[in-house]
Amino acid sequence: MLAALIPLFDENTAVRAYSLFAQKKNYLLNPSLLGTGSLDGAGAILGLEVVESLGAGTLADNQEVFVELSNVSMFSPIEESCSMPHEKVVLLFDRSVPAQPMYIKRLQQLKFMGYKLAIRNLPIEQFEEYGPILKLLDYIMLDYKKINMVAARNFFTKVYPGLKMIAVNVDSLEDFEELSKGQAYSLYEGDFYRLPVTKGSTQVAPLKVNYLELLKIVNNPDFELTKAADIIGRDTALVIELLRMVNHMTVNSQITSIRHAAAMLGQRELKKWINAVVSHQLCADKPNEITRLSLLRAKFAENLAPVFEMAALSSELFLMGLFSVLDIILDKPMKEALAMVNVSKEITDALVEKKGDMAKVLDFIECYELASWSELSRQMILFDIKEGPVYDSYVDALSWYRDLFGDKEDKK
């Protein structure tokens, strides 16, 4: 099985929810599943264990999680497989759930149990037919490119006043800004938040200069711990994070100085910690999802190293994933941004030229993030990769993120 979490944003580009999309098997490798085999295990809600095991707050800050339902799984005992508060779960389905009495009754039951309901891929010509279902819904996902925003807002405000609209496939920042001005939509989904800078140049803020200097030092093959510790000492937030990490890893550490704390971590762990935490700090003025995206890509890439038979490059893959959105973080073209952090030629080739073995891993990760299951299935056949290790690598990355920053995220 494969499962991915897609962020949903409000008008301030803050993550308010995640949609959980899952695939049972590689359909290219198992074409029978597209026929009657698709009913095998169809009663299960795929991927729900991801959120169940990690907790909804891991990525959505205790907000809502949209979970896919099919016309079969909607009749499963959902409450037995999901311990999350019902009001945090939005059951998402499409027109494969027909507007027939049996299905309407089941949706009424789920609504009575406290679950929220949402529909996607419903064409305008079926709005009238789905009237009884639309009355039960909390959300409707609409492709803003295929619908008149003003007309949709007027229609739903008048006929279904409690129904919230979600704009999907928002692929440009310009479109997001225009849509958010209209205040018709409650949430937005799309790639608008992670578009790279392709031209122009901006100044790096003074505090970020310290961070970049630190990254340059630790990404040298044999850096001095004391030099790195001295730069950490210039920033209170970094000092707090360093002490927090050392105290987490050791017992009765009795740290006497920042240099002492750095020495206790050691060169390898300090390098990894600095790359992760400094990237987090660099994202402070960006949508919070950029931080998550950077860190999750780093750990996911590192976990995929043995899957792609690149175990010896696990550390490099971690950095590649971490810096894959550095152009967004620094508001500079990728080539210029990478030159500021002193990474290897292999990482630069992967991120700038999209060349080399590491670029294949990044492309794989990007497909996974978008839940592009067809393309992902093709790549798994091409590279002889099984679903199990990929799924485990992704879930482990989520767990790592939760453990790394989970306490702070939950306090927000």
Image (cartoon, rainbow, N blue to C red):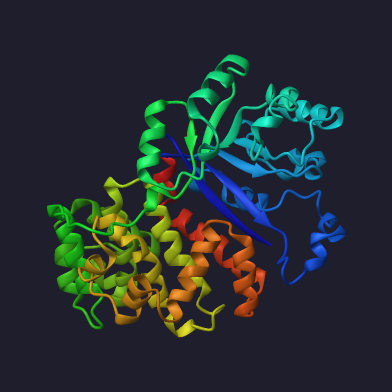
User: From where the camera sits, is residue 260 visible?
Assistant: yes
Residue at image position (37%, 29%) is 181
Q: Is residue 141 left or right of residue 28?
A: left
Q: How many marks?
A: 0
Could you tell me which quadrant the N terminus lies in?
A: bottom right
Q: Is residue 19 above or below residue 149?
A: below
Residues 297 and 263: in front is 297
Residue 224 location, x and y as percent? Answer: 18, 77
Q: Please state, as top left, top right, bottom left or bottom right, where the C terminus lies in the image.
A: top left
Quadrant hosting residue 351: bottom left
Q: Quadrant of residue 131?
A: top right
Residue 133 found in image quarter: top right
On the image, the x and y values in percent for residue 315 come to 39, 76
Whether residue 114 is situated above or below residue 313 in the rendered picture? above
- Residue 145 is left or right of residue 53, and the answer is left
Q: Nearer the viewer, residue 85 or 171?
A: 171
Q: Residue at coordinates 31% horizontally, 66% vertically from top-left?
A: 275
Q: Is residue 294 left or right of residue 3?
A: left
Camera-nearest residue between 387 and 99: 99
Query: Can residue 13 be spotted in the picture?
Result: no
Q: Is residue 122 left or right of residue 324?
A: right
Name the residue rendered at 78%, 27% in the picture: 109
Residue situated furthest top in the rendering: 158
Q: Where is residue 87 drawn, in percent x and y?
A: 62, 30
